[in-house]
């Protein structure tokens, strides 16, 4: 991106990095806004659609805009404490965003695998923390460890997801130091700025993970449904 997200004030950044469209047929995720047009043909499944769905839920786009609002909040001059609160807010929202995205992805994959809703709830309760879901639940559902998934997506993208992951861990570490030890000095303006700028890569990553791990299953289910429907509608001789 030519302009950094942290530089943008007059437009909600959710409209820039949150606008991912989902084909109603094959469930591929991309940024093709023409999908909103009736009759647009999906480049993946070749089905003429009647619109599309926004992929990311309201909670995700809200967190993006809250990060932006906090980062650019007007503060009284010579107020170190108010500035510190602003940076802390950005990092807290960013760390919450990573958790919301992981949970959403896990639920999407589990539903694509046709796990019943009560079983999904149980899996999430049995793996209550972010790290448990990342290191235990996710590999159980996808058959791959997180590092392998990052390597797969980095090999096919222009974004460095391994660098993104290092930043996510740094932000979480400093968030935890603030939350549990009251260490404010570790959260500064450069860290908050990096959190906003890395949110684009974070959104791209989870769209790519969906396309690799959930989309093929959902597309196969749609094909089966369409064949069944056609068979039922076929006139009997």
Image (cartoon, rainbow, N blue to C red):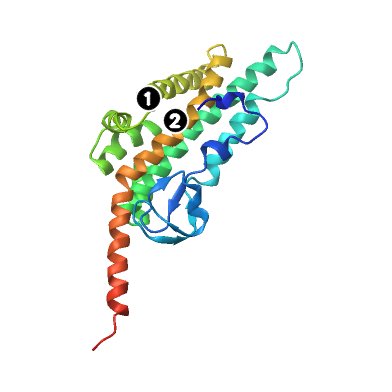
Residue at left 32%, top 79%? 233
Q: Is residue 138 above or below residue 3?
A: below
Camera sees residue 156: yes
On the image, the x and y values in percent for residue 54 come to 50, 50
Dot 1: within a 10 Å radius of its alpha carbon, few (fewer than 14), some, or many (20 or more) residues? some
Residue at left 23%, top 40%? 143
Is there CB contact under 8 Å for labels 2 and 1? yes
- Residue 201's disc number: 2
Residue at left 60%, top 26%? 89
Horizontal relation, residue 134 to residue 14: left or right? left
* SS state under label 2: helix
Question: Residue beneath label 1, please?
Answer: 160
Hey, which quadrant is residue 158 in on the image? Answer: top left
Q: Is residue 114 above or below residue 148?
A: below
Hey, which quadrant is residue 24 in on the image? Answer: bottom left
Is residue 206 or residue 138 the one in the foreground? 206
């Amino acid at each position: 991106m030519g302009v950094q997200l942290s530089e943008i004030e007059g437009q909600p950044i959710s409209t820039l990095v949150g606008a991912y469209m989902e084909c109603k047929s094959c469930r591929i995720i991309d940024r093709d806004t023409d999908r909103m047009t009736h009759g647009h043909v999906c480049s993946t499944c070749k089905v003429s659609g009647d619109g599309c769905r926004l992929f990311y839920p309201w909670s995700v786009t809200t967190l993006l805009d809250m990060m932006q609002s906090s980062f650019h909040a007007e503060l009284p001059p010579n107020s170190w404490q108010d500035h510190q609160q602003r940076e802390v807010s950005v990092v807290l929202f960013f760390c919450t965003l990573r958790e919301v995205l992981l949970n959403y992805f896990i639920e999407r994959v589990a539903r694509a695998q046709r796990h019943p809703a009560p079983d999904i709830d149980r899996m999430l309760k049995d793996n209550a923390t972010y790290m448990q879901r990342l290191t235990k639940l996710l590999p159980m559902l996808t058959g791959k460890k997180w590092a392998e998934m990052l390597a797969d997506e980095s090999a096919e993208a222009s974004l460095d997801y391994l660098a993104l992951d290092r930043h996510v861990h740094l932000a979480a570490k400093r968030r935890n130091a603030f939350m549990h030890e009251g260490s404010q000095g570790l959260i500064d303006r450069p860290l908050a700025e990096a959190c906003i700028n890395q949110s684009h890569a974070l959104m791209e990553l989870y769209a790519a993970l969906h396309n690799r791990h959930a989309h093929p299953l959902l597309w196969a289910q749609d094909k089966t449904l369409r064949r069944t429907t056609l068979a039922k509608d076929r006139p009997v001789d």
